[in-house]
Amino acid sequence: MARITPFLERHWLALVLLLVGVVVAQWLWRRRRSGRGQLFWPILVTAVAVFGAGGIILPSEAAMWSAAGLAALLFVTVLVLLISGSWSYYVGLALAAGLSASLGGWLMQPISTGLVESWRMLRSVEIGETLWFFIPVVVIYAFWFIRLIVWTIRPQDYSELIPSILPLQLLLQLSPFQGKRRPYVIWAVYVVFGIGIAVLYFVVRRYAPNLIRWYAVILLWHSLCVLVVWMSFRSLAALGPFRRVAAIALRCVLVTLAVLALAEVRMRKQSEALTVLFLVDRSLSIPEEPEIRGGLAVDTRRERVRSFIANAVHNRGSGRELDQSGVVVFGRRPRLVLPPSTTDKLILNEELASNVDPYYTDIAASIKLALASFPENTSKRIVLISDGNENLGNAEEQARLAKLNNVQIDVVTLAAGYRNENEVLVQAVEAPPLTEQGSRLPIRVLLRSYNPRIVRGELRLRQESTDTSILVPIVPGPGVEKIDGLTAIVQLRPGLNSFSFRQTIGNDKQSYTYKAEFNPLGIVDENGDFVKGLGGDRIQNNSATTHVVTLGQRRVLFIESEGAQGQHKHLIDLLSQPGKSKFQIFPITPSKLPATKGELGLFLSNFDSIVMANVPAEQFTQDQMEMIRANTFDQGCGLVMIGGPDSFGAGAWQDTPVEKALPVDCDIKSLQVAGKGGLVLIFHASEIAEGVRWQKEIAKLAVKKLSPVDMVGVVYWDFRTKWHVPFQTIGGNRGSILGQIDKMTPNDMPDCNPSLEMAYDELMKPSHSLAIKHIIFISDGDHWNADGRLLAKMKAAGISCTTVCIT
């Protein structure tokens, strides 16, 4: 069966043509002998059978050259026929049969492959959401229902309807309906067809719900095509029969394409490429198999591993040229020595594979690295070449993760793994990589024992720096038998053993290396007697290190408001107490900050945190606020904003870059004292370069600072004084108002009084109930003689006015 299946996959089409051709040809030749039928059809079907036989028998390359030679001979015989008039019937049949067989051997496999690929493509076709297609279908069938009612009320010749409905046309050709044009016949077809569609819908939905979308597509396509045929049959009557049929067919093709486009037909092609990563164990638990060759010792086990990988990649088979393969070697840590590639010669160089720590085996880490190294859009497989003797990590956990990601893991087991019963190792030293000066540092040392008995030994933890080396005291606990000064005598049970150490770090800013060392003294036998020595234990495994960096005093930039220096003196003194504090405080005001982005970024990089103590946004430039945000987001610097009357929302920090760096927004959620405010912006054209742009920026900034309950309007001169933005509550219209300001083109107003009058009248309307009324007049500095009585009236009404000059 293993040989038959590949044969059928390659030659299925040739077998079908051969079998069908033989059966049909035999039937046609029998008809020919009885005097019925033409000679052309038996010969054609026989040629098809010979074509299939050639696809099975002849190899592709030989068939190609054979077809070329036979085609040349056939051409010569045709020339002889044209020149001399002589022809041999049997020679012609032989040449035609040979040419047909050769073409079959040459073309059959590509045709078979193409048909298989086409079928796979059709199976991968997907469509979008098409349930809404039933809506136009219902509309179309309602249209037919109305038409049938009209035709029933006004009996007439139904010839305009009949040709467009194929079932009706066929029905009317049958007795007893032949020659009749009665309404009930058409109604019967309509009702039966509608019931059939409904029944088929429920059947598909019940037994094949995944096909319901295709059902909607087919139903809409059929309904539209029937409608197109009916509408076109009479409108194209002036054309000839052939041209009319061609035009209707073309319209139906366009309808088909439109329906497929609406259905969002797409094709999902799955990649058949495979990526294989070989995970090679290079730890010392795998014993060597040395062999002397040319005076040098060669590890034949590693040679067999290299040969296995090279042969597996080289013999991957035809059609797998896009498959990729790579190699990960591992001991204590994994390393990707050969990234995935499509090469068919994967050679594991000993120099590449030798740079690993062989005293530990972490299979889990190698699987994790392999999962991260796979390329996208390929199938994934891991081949683990190991003895399975791990002493770090959890391979089962990573294997489950690989299974969840559809990654297959195959294991090539090496000879019995080498595990020494006497093996004891220091697995890890665990400590925080960063710690504060003066803090108590917790340290944990993990030791693993493979001995089935209790192992006794000396455990030391040493703190090493550039100029000192001191022992760290152990914390008494389980397994700690005796503490001799700073050296502890511990007992190790089979498996993982944990011991705790604790040390108070000094006030210096530097890095330390903590090194744990275990010296085995002996074991406790089954009688409880102590037996000295632990033969076979590898001292290379009996130590481990980790690194810790202690941080000095943290530098804090304390920004106070201009003119308010000293308001936070008590807080600053408390944070910077001499000899106790972990902070160095640097008070500063916004005016002393660098103005440019580059200089400010460099300046802020010297600090671990920034404190903004009740500082309003107006004291910072846009670039400074952006750099403070970037310093927090990109550099990880701390940011603290202290509240007050000039901070958060009251300090106008809404919609600023600094607000984006804060964990809260700066909008004022409720107003307890101040009521609703009204703002009117009056624009006069600025004649300087970029003047109008800056006017708009100022106006938009003012709008952004208003709360949702406030009201705003924009007045400008457009050959008359008018509202560009009608006076309105901001609410959810802030974005629309800002957009209208962007589109405005103010003109030179001849007089300011009409604009001020319009703003005054609007702000004073009782329906607005405004507690605060304000006007901002933005101009280029043109001078007018404003009406003094109007200004006095505005002042008496509590309307304040701010002028902004862009020059």
Image: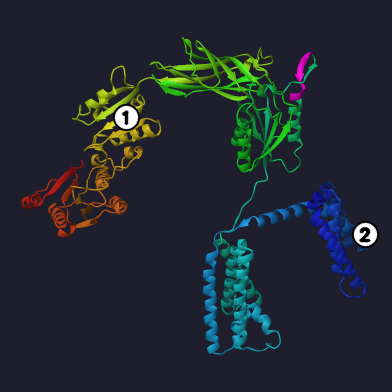
Which segment is the magenta one?
295-302
Q: What residue type is disc 1 on?
A: Ile
Q: Does residue 738 appear to the left or right of 780 in the view shown?
A: right
**How far across and down, in percent of the image, does residue 707 sit?**
25, 49
Q: Secondary structure at mark 1?
A: strand
**How far across and down, in percent of the image, does residue 606 sit?**
35, 24
Q: What residue type is disc 2 on?
A: Val
* Residue 76 visible in the shown view: no
Q: Secondary structure at mark 2?
A: helix
**How far across and down, in percent of the image, does residue 360 sit?**
63, 23
The residue wearing badge 2 is: 91
Q: Residue at x 23, y 37 (%)?
A: 644
The residue wearing badge 1 is: 610
Ranked by sequence position, the earlier of labels 2 and 1 is 2
Q: Is residue 241 above or below residue 613?
A: below
User: What is the crowding at mark 1: few (fewer than 14 residues within 10 Å), some, or many (at least 20)?
Assistant: many
In the depicted view, which residue is nearer to us: 622 or 313?
Answer: 313
In the depicted view, which residue is nearer to us: 443 or 520?
Answer: 520
